[in-house]
């Protein structure tokens, strides 16, 4: 069993003032990678949060204490606003439902002990609520000697966790919970998107992809199978975005529809129905793009939270280029 967060207003209230005294893991790192080496790009995968109108500043204040040490400029975690309030909610308050997206901050237990304590203390206070605890056997529990606590600030938002590691580098790990019967399909889907095989697999219920390794903090993506009694429900206010190349070839192998939301971005859904954003890049790197409301609204109009669209490929480049490039 786990406690579920209350339905907070979609525009969250401001978090209390808070500061973390640590230099960012990468500052100006966007200029330090090689354009043809996607593994060296710290922003090859990013998380996009979408708030209701005038909600972005409050949400930034809420998340700044968690990401200031690694992403003070909010390039890895991107926050944007809709032009109108969302009326699209999924039933993630049901007893068997769990938010599919998680952010895990894994820090060195010796070098970062003070930061770990500060972040864990921050997550223990409102508006954060304990959501569930996961033990080393990957089951949801209420307590365990080697436990990992997950917290949520509101429904329809990702879960967050902070944990110490015994050795090695710091990690920011984006994790997605998979339904029990789609785990292998999810791995295949993200193998296509990332154009690489998992770095690590365990017990046919967990795998890790290494996305970035050349800064003061590794970026990872993980897929974790939920126990059969739980059902991940797609979010409508947070999405993962991946930089991709050879988009025509990629779309030929994706299981669900691809729809353009700007001249450089498309959206599709993974086997569990989670919206996935694809940022099309060329051989050279492209600038970090500023969030725009128009493409957000295009994305929102395409969302189908209860049923995936039938497969429909958009391979005509002229059609992509005809859409105004107001980038998300």
Image (cartoon, grey):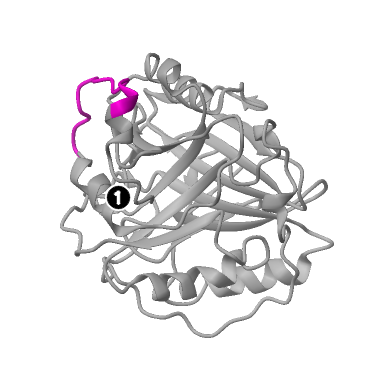
Q: Where 32 sits versus 62, above or below?
A: above
Dot 1 corresponds to which residue? 295
Q: Is residue 252 left or right of residue 280?
A: left
Which residue is farthest bottom? 17
At 26% across and 71% down in the image, what residue appears?
Answer: 9
Q: Where 301 sits versus 72, above or below?
A: above
Residue 320 on image: x %, y %: 31, 32
Q: Where 17 sits versus 31, above or below?
A: below
At 18% across and 46% down in the image, what residue appears?
Answer: 301
Picture mark count: 1
Q: Between residue 26 and residue 101, name the one nearer to us.
A: 26
Q: Where 183 sits versus 216, above or below?
A: above
Whether residue 221 is in magenta: the answer is no
At 61% across and 21% down in the image, what residue appears?
Answer: 197
The answer, for residue 143, to whether it is visible in the render is no
Part of the protein shown in magenta: 305-318
Q: Secondary structure at mark 1?
A: helix
Residue 214 on image: x %, y %: 77, 43
The answer, for residue 261, to whether it is visible in the render is yes
């Amino acid at each position: 069993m786990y406690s579920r967060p209350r339905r907070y207003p979609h525009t969250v209230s401001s978090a209390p003032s808070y500061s973390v005294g640590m230099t960012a893991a990468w500052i100006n790192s966007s200029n330090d990678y090689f354009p043809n080496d996607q593994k060296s790009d710290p922003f090859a995968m990013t998380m996009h949060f979408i708030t209701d109108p005038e909600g972005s500043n409050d949400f930034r204040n809420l998340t700044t204490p968690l990401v200031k040490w690694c992403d003070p400029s909010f390039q890895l975690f991107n926050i944007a606003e809709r032009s109108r309030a969302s009326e699209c909610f999924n039933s993630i308050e049901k007893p068997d439902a769990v938010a599919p997206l998680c952010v895990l901050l894994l820090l060195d237990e010796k070098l970062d002990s003070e930061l770990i304590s500060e972040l864990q203390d921050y997550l223990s206070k409102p508006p954060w609520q304990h959501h569930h605890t996961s033990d080393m056997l990957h089951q949801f529990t209420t307590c365990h000697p080697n436990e990992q606590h997950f917290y949520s600030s509101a429904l329809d938002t990702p879960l967050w966790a902070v944990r110490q590691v015994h050795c090695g580098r710091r990690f920011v790990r984006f994790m997605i919970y998979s339904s029990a019967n789609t785990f292998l399909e999810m791995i295949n889907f993200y193998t296509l998107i990332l154009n690489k095989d998992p770095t690590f697999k365990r017990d046919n219920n967990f795998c890790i992809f290494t996305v970035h390794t050349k800064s003061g903090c590794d970026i990872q993506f993980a897929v974790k199978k939920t126990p059969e009694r739980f059902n991940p429900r797609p979010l409508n206010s947070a999405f993962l975005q991946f930089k991709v190349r050879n988009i025509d070839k990629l779309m030929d192998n994706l299981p669900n529809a691809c729809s353009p939301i700007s001249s450089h971005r498309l959206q599709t859904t993974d086997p569990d129905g989670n919206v996935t954003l694809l940022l099309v890049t060329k051989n050279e790197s492209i600038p970090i793009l500023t969030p725009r409301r128009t493409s957000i609204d295009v994305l929102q109009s395409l969302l189908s939270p209860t049923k995936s669209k039938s497969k429909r490929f958009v391979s005509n480049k002229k059609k992509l280029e005809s859409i105004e490039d107001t980038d998300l």
